[in-house]
Image (cartoon, helix red, strand yellow):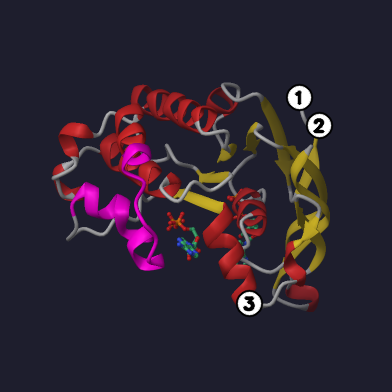
Amino acid sequence: DSILTTKNLTKRYGRDENAVVALDHCSLTIPEGGKIAIVGESGSGKSTLLHLLGALDIPTEGEVFFRGQSIYTMKDQALSAFRRQNIGFVFQSYNLVPELTAKENIMLPLLIDGRDVDGEYFEHVVEVLGLHSRLGHLPGQMSGGQQQRTAIARAVMNKPPILLCDEPTGNLDSKTSAEVIALLLEVTQDFHMTLILVTHDRKLADKMEAVITIQDGRIGGGLS
Ligand code: ADP
Ligand code: ADP
């Protein structure tokens, strides 16, 4: 079964003759529990596609379906509730709060939502990501890889069925990048999440189950 489907998904920035077509009638299906890479050159539309899959933006045309339901028919409030409940995000820039420890950063989304922390789940995630000895550290006291592992823990803390990652290893060296990709695969496998990872690095993409290529806003090759 598919968890996300897009139909003729299109995003134009600007109007008329100045419009940039970032995404051009893109139709694809992401299977439940899939581990998918979206690969393409800089400017090909990867981030735009990821943001639309994660309800961070509004398409110009076309639709995104989550388990069969068209998400962009929801009103703003319902859409952000949908996003908080179902989507975890990991960005290239980690986006950790510098004044908070790793543990506080990981807990922050749950605290903001007033949700309880599942202690057993927290321990399990921290263990898989190898963060035990870093929980009391501030982001500035951690390496890039450790900061990104902290951001991954934060992104999965409310158990979203979908984890979206936008160039998560863009600031990391190749050895650390490979480790982070392996951990992303392990965490999402352990907790039955769908993983969608955007990268311009074909070698990293090939570590996933399937690769979707994108060029000039168009899907090419489909699942391979
Ligand atoms: P990628 O993630 O593959 O680098 P993007 O989705 O960021 O590609 O961008 C796709 C195209 O859309 C590019 O031509 C980019 O310049 C353009 N674009 C992205 N965001 C905006 C924006 N906010 N305003 C105008 N053009 C944009
Ligand atoms: P950068 O490209 O500077 O590294 P990011 O990858 O962190 O930026 O973020 C990419 C885009 O996603 C930005 O346009 C940002 O506004 C948006 N974004 C980042 N985090 C969130 C969030 N938690 N909610 C909504 N939008 C976000």
Instruction: Name the kind of residue labelled 1 in the image.
Output: Ser
Residue drawn 63% across and 66% down? Answer: 57
For the residue pair 205 and 63, the one nearer the viewer reads as 63
Left or right, 163 with reference to 176? right
Q: Nearer the viewer, mark 1 or mark 3?
A: 3
Sequence-earlier tag: 1 or 3: 3
Taking the image in four quarters, ligand 1 sits in the one at bottom right
Which mark is on residue 221? 2
Q: Secondary structure at mark 3?
A: helix
Q: Nearer the viewer, mark 2 or mark 3?
A: 3
Q: Secondary structure at mark 2?
A: loop
Q: Which residue is mark 3?
A: 76
Q: What is the magenta range?
A: 101-122
Which mark is on residue 28? none
Eyeballing the image, is 27 above or below 197?
Answer: below
Left or right, 157 with reference to 15? left
